[in-house]
Image (cartoon, rainbow, N blue to C red):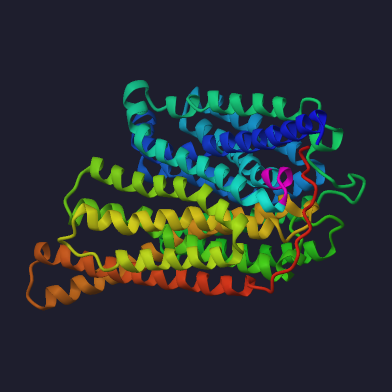
Amino acid sequence: MSALGSSSVAHDERRRWLVAACVGLGLFASALDTTVNVALPTIAGAFDADVSTIQWIIIAFVTTSTGLSVSMGSAGDRFGLWRLYRLGLLTYALAMLLIGFAPNLQVLVAFRVLQGIGAAAVMSVGPALVALAFAPAERGRALGVAGGTQAIGGVIAGFGGGVLIDAFGWPSIFLGRLPFIAAALLLTVAVLRGAPAEARAGTTTDLARGRFDVGGAAALFVAVACLLVGLNLARSLGAASAPVIALLAGAALVAGVFIRIERHAEWPVLDLALFGLRVFSAAFLTLALSWIGVFTIWFILPFFVADVLGHGASALGLLLGLLGLCTAIAAPLGGWAADRLRPEWLVTAAATAVAVALLWISTLGGGASLVAVALPLALAGAAQGTLRAAARTLVFNSVPGSGLGSASGALNLGMSMGVVLSVALFSALFSVREDVHTARLLASGLSEAAAEAPAFVEAFRETFRAAALVALAGAASSLFAWRPRLAVAEAPPGAH
C-alpha cells in the first residue's frame, strides 16, 4: 500500500472513531438526566409543589422522548441522520439553558417537553450514526464504546448529582450538561469537515421519495402518551378509575389507527416490514422483556436495602453505582465479542444472565450482607451492557442502511416501554403480595410492627422471581434470531 493510501485509511479510521466519540458524548449527556430524580425534592421545595405535581417533571420528559423515538429515527433516515443528530443536540442544549432559568414549575415542565424532543433525536439517531460509520465486522465494538459512555453518564449522575445540587442548587444539574453538548457539537464539525455531501447528511436515501409520515408520527405519539400517562395515573387513581380506563382505551384505539396509517404511508414512520424480519422482532422483544425485568432493581431494591437491611443512602449509591459501572465496562467488551462471535448467541447468553441475576436477587433475605447484594447486581449490570451492544449489532447488521434510524428508534421504544411497564406491573404486584403476606402474618398473631419486615421480604422475593420469568421469556425470544451462518456483505461505511 502506498503512503498516500495508508494516510487515507488512517484518516478514515480516525473519522469513524470521532463519530463514535461524538455519539458517545451525546448519549453521555442524555444519561445524566437520572440526576433529576435526585433533584425532585429540592425542586419541589423551590416551587412549593407537592408530589403529585412534581412528578410531571418526569412524565413530560419520558412521554415526549419515548413517543418521538421512532419518529426521530425515521426522520433521520428520511432527511439525514447527521442533520437530525445536530438538531437534537441543539434542541437539548437550548432546553438545558431554559430549564436552568425557569421561573416556575409550569415553565420548567414545558421546557422538559423540549428536552424530550432533543433527547429523542440524540438517543435514536446516535446509534444509527455509529452503525452507518462502521462496517458490520467493526460495529459491535463501536456500539459498545458508545453504549459504555452512556452507562458512565448514569454512574456519574448517581454519584455526583447530589453533590452538585448541594453545592450549586438544582439548576446546576441542567446547566452543567452544556459543556458536554458543546463538545459533541464541535466533534460533529471535526467529523464532517471535508466529507462528501452524502456523508455530511448521513443518509443514502433519495429525499424525493415520498412525504414524511406526519400522520403516523402523530398517531404513535398520542398512543404512547395515552399509555404512559394512563399507567402513571393508575398508581395514584387506581386502575379502575375513569380517567385511567379512558386513557388506556384511547391508547389501544389510536394504536390501531397508527397501524392502519403505516400500511398505506408512502414513507412510514415505522416500517412494519421490520417486524417481518425474524432477527429484528426477536431482538426487539428480547430487549423489551429484559428491560421489564431488570428495571425492577431500580425501584424496589432501594427500599429493600434501606428498610430491611438498614443501610443509608451512601451504601445504596455504591450498589447502584456498581451496577452502572459493570454496564459501562461490559458494553464495549460485549460489542467486541459481538464482532467476533455470532451476536445472536451473545444476545441469548446475556438475556439469560439477566434472568439469572434477578433470580439470584430473589434469594436474598433480611440478613443479607452488602456483598451478597452486590454480586447479583454486578452480574445484572454486565449482562445489561452486553445485551444492548450485542442486540444493536445484530439488528444493524440485518437491516438495510436506509432503515438504520427507524430500527434504532424502534429498539429505543422497546427499551423505554420496558422501563415504564416494569414500574407499572411490578409495583402493583409487589403492593398486592405485600398486603397478602401482611394479612397472613397478622392473622397468625404477629403485631403490625413485627409483620412489616417479613411481609416485605416475601413480596420482594416473589416480585423478583416474576421479573426473572419475564427476563427468561426475553432470552427464549432471542432464540428466534438464531439462523445458519451466512456471508454478510460489508456495506461501505457512510461517514467516510
Quadrant position of residue 250: bottom right
The quarter of the rendered structure image containing the C terminus is: top right
Residue at the (65%, 24%) spot, across then down: 186
Q: Main secondary structure of the magenta part?
A: helix
Q: Image check: 197 left or right of 484? A: right
Residue 317 image position (x, y, % from top left):
30, 42
Q: Image check: 255 left or right of 381? A: right
The quarter of the rendered structure image containing the N terminus is: top right
Would you place residue 272 above or below residue 75 in this image? below
Q: Is residue 442 magenta?
A: no
Quadrant position of residue 361: bottom left
Q: Is residue 133 magenta?
A: yes
**Highlighted magenta segment, given as a residue range:** 130-135
Residue 140 image position (x, y, % from top left):
61, 51
292, 471: nearer the viewer: 471
Does residue 249 appear anywhere in the picture? Answer: no
Residue 227 image position (x, y, % from top left):
56, 59
54, 26: nearer the viewer: 26
Residue at the (13%, 73%) spot, across then down: 442
Would you place residue 468 above or below residue 179 in this image? below
Does residue 95 appear anywhere in the picture? Answer: yes
280, 239: nearer the viewer: 280
Q: Image check: 300 left or right of 269? A: left
21, 214: nearer the viewer: 21
